[in-house]
Image (spheres, rainbow, N blue to C red):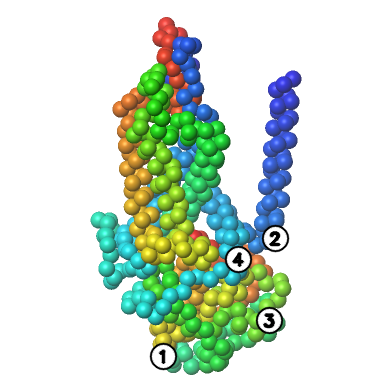
Amino acid sequence: MQRFGGGLNTEVRFDARTAYIRHSVVVRVTHWINAAAFVGLVVSGIAILLAHPRLYWGETGGVGTPSIFDLPLPFMLTGQSGWGRSLHFLSAWVCVLNGLLYVAYGVVTRHFDRNLLPARNDPRPPAEELQTYNLTQRLTYLTVVFVLSPIMIWTGFAMSPAITSVFPTIVTILKGQQSARTVHFIVASVLVTFLGIHVAMVYVTGFRTHMRAMLTGRAGKELHAGPS
Amino acid sequence: MLDRRKLIKSGIAAAAGASGLAVAARLANQYGLVPPDHGGIYGVGETLTYASQRLLTSRYSLAREFTRNDISRIAPVNGEPPQNDEYQSLLNGNFAGWRLVIDGLVARPSSWSLAELKRLPASSQITHQACEEGWSFIAQWTGVSLSYVLNLVGVSNRARFVVFYPFDFDINFWDSLDMADAFHPQTLLAYGMNGEELPTQHGAPLRLRVPRQLGYKSVKYLSRISLVDTLKNIGSGLGSASPDYGYSWYAGI
């Protein structure tokens, strides 16, 4: 029998009456690509930030000018912001292209309608807890996908001198390039917090079941087979 | 039977995909959409960023300009002026003996004194300069458009990049621009800053200003400009000293 690390058994057999596909293949693939790209973005984001761990508001800021927030981190000028940027942009490309695929898929297949928009007066209780998302989960996922991620892309673009030469409004509306950098950092922190809670909830509510559902797509009442 | 058909189909699809990619790469290179540091896994990101920004930004989109009131009181710098004797003696002589050499693929290779450059039509801009580290400032820069000088010396059709050499270019990064940024109306050879002579720390007597890219592309302490058709034979062949230190050649970000 094939086993993943941690003894996650993918060959579990399900009661045929309750077995169903929890996550479609597109959702599963884009989920894990996004997970990898997000880790790349966080690691490289920290590498870039460490070159100047101070945040400002407005157009400009630097040593000797007032900051709005000094992070309790050392100034690291060891060149890590170089590979940091390269990894950041590579991960950002993967994240954005993958995210666009996911959103297009979600719209076309009505995945967002059916699974993420708050259910409208559906009197039927879900057959099983795992089969559906509760209101908090739905709102959280919608916020991450349709509010926080677009803000990250927007504020990222707003720091680019080349892109703002074409679309200056994206930075002037934020009061300046340093404001864009600060918003980028704050929203990134919110997303990292989300990731922490997301992973913790997966552990708390059944690591194996959730991982199996997100890796193989399969879920349902397990049949307890004899020794194999 | 079915499996074999599937195999043939996916084989054809893979071949079509690979040749499609090869054609795309060739076209991209022909239209100047591939940066010199396109190799390796990070090169994929560099190429996507450079190509998409070149397609998006046109040659004429202008970096934002500001008013006198926006000029920063503090304009930080990185790095020290060149320490070599040649530069130090020019500095002591107030750059009277300094000349900017322009050579390579040009009709009239020449060298220019500071006074000669100052007699050319002056151009001024108040622009934002961001360091890749994260800090930034706004300053007014005065000088002559690089495009004006390039037109005077007559650039060959074969030229694809403009290479900028500072004094002491082992320590002060040499760099290069593609023709889109070299002929961009805001790309400046600056000899003045905030209404005064360019301060030593900011690259006296002459520096480059490329306001659509991060600060490190604005090469300081210029001594020579060279037009080339390829960057492969210069340094590590990656278009500037920056990739040797892990930084991108293209910094429009």
- Location of mark 3 (residue): B154
Q: Chain of mark 2?
A: B
Q: Are marks 3 and 4 on the same chain?
A: yes
The amino acid at mark 3 is: Gly
> In terms of depth relative to the viewer, which is nearer, B249 or A198?
A198
Q: Are marks 1 and 4 on the same chain?
A: yes
**What is the C-alpha distance between the residues marked 3 and 4?**
23 Å
Q: Are marks 1 and 4 in contact (CB under 8 Å)?
A: no
Category of crowding for the residue at label 3, using alpha-carbon neighbours closer than 10 angstroms: few (below 14), some (14–19), many (at least 20) = some
Q: Secondary structure at mark 3?
A: loop
Q: What residue is at 63 percent from the left and 75 percent from the top?
A: B227
- Location of mark 2 (residue): B30
- Location of mark 1 (residue): B92
Q: Secondary structure at mark 2?
A: helix
> Is residue A51 shown to the viewer in this render?
no
Q: Are marks 3 and 1 in contact (CB under 8 Å)?
A: no
Q: Chain of mark 3?
A: B
